[in-house]
């Protein structure tokens, strides 16, 4: 099939590349000439394991191309996948300007049936707004009839950063929402053909109405965020009552009704999905006269959790950290990505700097993105940046530090040379925000502070 993907951000680039890898002819559109030039030169603007190699393979095979030409992208395919960003608006609701702009662009250039599919995470009712936006443009054009017929569908993504290619190529479910009407069978047939290669072993596609598909994406992310905040709340109580939360986690997770996934205590969730999706869902509820009180609590717990590690450090060394230095391991919001959006590390770094500390930072892949993100965070107090140093190795970050602070659970941090680490630290103190180690590490002479352990 010919497929057009609008947007070469995280979702668009992964989706377009994976669809090309199963034999489709994919054209990816982005209005940023610099990004398109980078992709055409074989460079990738985001870090995702295996993505660069997959893009190169499909570029060489001629199945994956990039363009800034809207007319070309619309003419290329009946199926137009919208995968542009939906950042939070000032009130926390999803900003749909880019989604609706993409829909209008399709309507402006279409000359034949189009299936417009939103892969972006969008609130309930967005498909109707997409339809109205396209109808408005077509009316301005005076266009009508089969040559300008279109259908709107929702096909939300369920990709985990760091494992996105595996998630796309071997999905546990494919959610497809279509509009009722005379063109629905045509839309379903196109989407069935699009995802046929991913349903060889068994049918993974769940067909539903378009509003239900939009809701499903938010509901899934909200549930995962709820599990994280719930566990963090329990971990903070475990600290007070002297219980090892890891033992509790194993006891809970062994119940098949609960399971182990997303039950790890830590410094809170971040990234581009959970924070904005929880906010957007609560704002949708408010717009309909309802409060989602559980999700309001989930959001509040998560914001507080980002400060728990700093609280432990202040309790140990005092609120005034002038003259203290700390090594920070991990800056990206999660391992196997360079994504710094809403990363807990940003809260930790700012809070420690404001207390007077000096910091040495290390992350295996997110150093460039961290520099940019922290510069934005400290734009009101740029002098704070003078007390940050970046280093290429974990051990260098610990050298001469009063304590090591672990914020992201990269594999490279899970089994360090503890003897070398102890020798590098000024004092053998570890604040483990991801519970990477067992409390028995204390027997090796470390003072160990974790979350609920």
Image: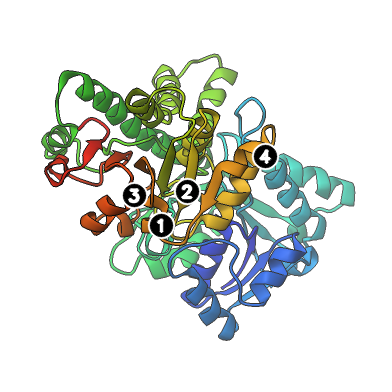
Q: Is residue 98 left or right of residue 367?
A: right
Task: Tell me whether circle 1 and circle 2 mark residues in contact (CB < 8 Å).
Answer: yes
Which of marks 4 and 1 precedes in the sequence? 4
Question: Residue 396, which numbered label?
Answer: 1
**Residue 423 drawn at (x, y percent):** 27, 53
**Residue 375 drawn at (x, y percent):** 64, 44
Rendering quarter of residue 232: top left
Mark 3 — residue? 409
The quarter of the picture where the C terminus appears is top left
Q: Residue at x 54, y 74 (%)?
A: 55
Q: Is residue 288 left or right of residue 6?
A: left
Q: CA distance from mark 3 to mark 1?
A: 18 Å
Q: CA distance from mark 1 to mark 4?
A: 44 Å
From what the image shows, is residue 433 above or below residue 40?
above
Q: CA distance from mark 4 to mark 3?
A: 33 Å
Q: Residue at x 49, y 35 (%)?
A: 357
**Residue 21 drawn at (x, y percent):** 48, 75
**Residue 174 drawn at (x, y percent):** 41, 54
Q: Residue at x 75, y 59 (%)?
A: 31
Task: Tell me whether circle 1 and circle 4 mark residues in contact (CB < 8 Å).
Answer: no
């Amino acid at each position: 099939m010919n497929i057009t993907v609008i947007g070469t951000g995280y979702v668009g680039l992964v989706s377009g590349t994976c669809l090309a890898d199963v034999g489709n002819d994919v054209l990816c559109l982005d209005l940023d000439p610099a990004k398109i030039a980078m992709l055409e030169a074989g460079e990738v603007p985001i870090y995702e394991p295996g993505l660069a190699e997959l893009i190169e393979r499909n570029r060489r095979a001629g199945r994956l191309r990039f363009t800034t030409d809207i007319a070309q992208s619309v003419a290329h395919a009946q199926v137009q996948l919208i995968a542009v960003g939906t950042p939070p608006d000032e009130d926390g609701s999803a900003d749909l300007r880019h989604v609706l702009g993409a829909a209008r662009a399709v309507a402006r250039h279409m000359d034949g049936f189009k299936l417009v599919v939103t892969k972006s995470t969008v609130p309930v009712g967005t498909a109707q707004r997409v339809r109205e936006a396209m109808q408005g443009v077509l009316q301005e054009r005076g266009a009508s009839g089969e040559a300008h017929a279109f259908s709107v569908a929702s096909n939300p993504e369920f990709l985990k950063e760091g494992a996105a290619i595996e998630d796309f190529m071997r999905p546990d479910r494919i959610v497809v929402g279509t509009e009722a009407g005379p063109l629905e069978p045509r839309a379903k047939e196109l989407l069935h053909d699009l995802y046929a290669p991913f349903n060889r072993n068994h049918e993974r596609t769940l067909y539903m109405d378009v509003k239900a598909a939009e809701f499903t994406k938010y509901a899934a992310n909200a549930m995962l965020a709820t599990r994280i905040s719930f566990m963090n709340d329990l971990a903070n109580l475990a600290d007070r009552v002297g219980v090892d939360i890891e033992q509790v986690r194993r006891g809970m997770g062994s119940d098949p009704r609960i399971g182990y996934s997303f039950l790890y205590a830590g410094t809170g969730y971040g990234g581009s999905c959970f924070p904005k999706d929880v906010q957007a869902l609560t704002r949708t509820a408010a717009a309909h006269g309802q409060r989602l009180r559980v999700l309001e609590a989930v959001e509040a717990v998560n914001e507080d959790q980002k400060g728990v590690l700093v609280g432990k450090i202040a309790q140990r060394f005092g609120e005034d950290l002038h003259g203290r230095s700390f090594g920070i391991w991990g800056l990206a919001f999660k391992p196997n990505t360079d994504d710094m959006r809403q990363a807990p590390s940003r809260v930790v770094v700012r809070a420690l700097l404001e207390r007077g500390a000096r910091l040495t930072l290390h992350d295996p892949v997110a150093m460039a993105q961290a520099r940019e993100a922290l510069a934005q965070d400290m734009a009101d107090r740029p002098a704070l940046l003078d007390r940050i140093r970046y280093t290429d190795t974990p051990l260098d970050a610990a050298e001469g530090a009063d304590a090591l602070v672990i914020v992201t659970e990269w594999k490279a941090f899970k089994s360090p040379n503890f003897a070398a680490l102890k020798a590098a630290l000024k004092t053998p103190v570890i604040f483990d925000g991801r519970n990477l180690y067992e409390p028995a590490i204390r027997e090796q002479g470390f003072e160990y502070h974790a979350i609920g352990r």
